[in-house]
Amino acid sequence: MGDRRDRVEPFPTRRRGTVDYMRAAGRRSNVHGLIEVDVTEARRRIEAIEVETGDSLSFTGFLVYCLARALDDHPHVNAYRDWRGRVHVFEAVDVNVLVETTIRGDRMAVPHVVRTANDRSVRSIHDEIRTAQEAADPTNLSRLGELAFRLPGAIRRLVWRLPQWFPRRWRDVAGTVSVTSVGMFGAGGGWAISPTNYTVQLTVGGISEKPRFVDGKITTREILHLTVTFDHDVVDGGPAARFVQRLRDLIEAAHGLDPPTDG
């Protein structure tokens, strides 16, 4: 006999886009780097800013800022190859970031593109992310959009070939790099690995406390687990390693965050 608690539910239309994206991204030459970054100073400054201003600064916004600055220093990582084998290097760093918001009573993560993040302050990025979180329904689809999601999967998935076919169009629609923050859904450390359709993606994992040597002494530090994913067809190992080191330096130095005032 069947379990009376079993039920069959319709598959959400918007989730079809996620399925299409993951299938297309799985065909790219992705290389994943799992790194640990000391965020003790950054979190200390964010907490101090909250005490001084009463406003909780977005940690994701800070990471978006550091990512954009690192790409500004290594612009050839902010690039795509087109179908003719040419490399399109973008000056502006447009970051596609997942923000958690309420849609029809449910909490879910939706994409939002922060434009020209390499020319923005942490506060400016923070304000934009907060505005996106408070939007009524940032993924509200037009009638044409709803119909597009009902097309056969093979046709729908053609849109995810935009990075290879028309990199500039991909930038206009989805940004140049991506940040996905799985750490916001739970506590504790750990990495996440995900396929991506971007040349560079930063997957933010959890934060854990670990012992570290600081000034010759062992002390407890807050360690963030990051996964940096590259498309190896565009970025070689050397440039990728230098970019990651620059990103680590910026985060650990709490770049863009004012130090607490005395007293």
Image (cartoon, rainbow, N blue to C red):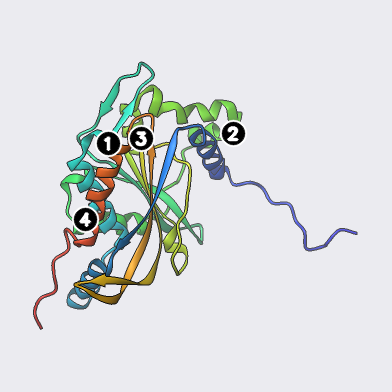
Q: Amino acid at mark 1?
A: Asn
Q: Amino acid at mark 2?
A: Arg
Cα distance in 3D space between marks 2 and 3: 20 Å
Q: In the picture provided, is 252 more to the left or to the right than 230?
A: left
Indicate the secondary structure of the residue bearing disc 2: loop
Cα distance in 3D space between marks 2 and 4: 46 Å
> In front: mark 4 or mark 3?
4
Q: Is residue 214 above or below residue 228?
A: below
> In front: mark 1 or mark 3?
1
**Image quarter for residue 213?**
bottom left
Mark earlier in primary sequence (2, 3): 2
Q: Position of residue 148 (x, y in %)?
A: 53, 32
Mark carried by residue 249: 4
| Residue at numbered disc 1 | 78
| Residue at numbered disc 2 | 150
**Residue at 42% over, 40% down:** 31
